[in-house]
Amino acid sequence: EHMPSTTMDGAAFAEGMDILTLLIETGLAGSRSEGRRLVQQGGVNLGEERVADIAQVVTLGHFQDGELIIRKVKKVYHKVVLA
């Protein structure tokens, strides 16, 4: 409920957005290389699903009720809300 959130246009996910771009857009990674390192070390989850591939594409299908929870490492949560 009190987690940081970012509102993004749903059209950005219609064709899919790669996970590294999403991490940068939400501020969870400062650069693509930092995001790549996080994913490769198993430190990123989309909802309950661990992201295992840096080529992961996030689509509208990942969202539930217009929201997606991203977890970085164990305790950093961020909510992406569709506008």
Image: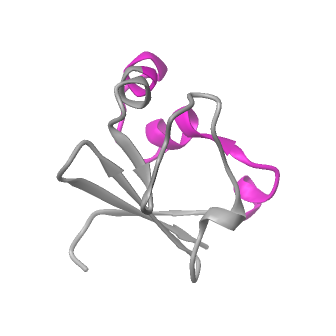
2 to 21, vertically: above or below: below
Image location of residue 35, percent across then percent down: 42, 27
State left or right for residue 33 relative to residue 53. left
Locate the C terminus by quadrant. Answer: bottom right
**Magenta part of the protein: which range?**
10-36
74 to 5, vertically: above or below: above
Magenta stretch encompasses residue 9 = no
Q: Residue furthest top?
A: 33
Image location of residue 29, percent across then percent down: 36, 33
Give the camera-side residue of 83 and 74.
Answer: 74
State left or right for residue 74 relative to residue 31. left
Residue drawn 46% across and 36% down? 24
Residue drawn 71% across and 56% down? 13
Residue drawn 17% across and 52% down? 75
Magenta stretch encompasses residue 14 = yes
Place residue 59 in its image quadrant.
bottom right
State left or right for residue 13 relative to residue 52. right
24 to 68, vertically: above or below: above
Locate the N terminus by quadrant. Answer: bottom left
Place residue 55 in its image quadrant.
top right
Image location of residue 28, percent across then percent down: 34, 41
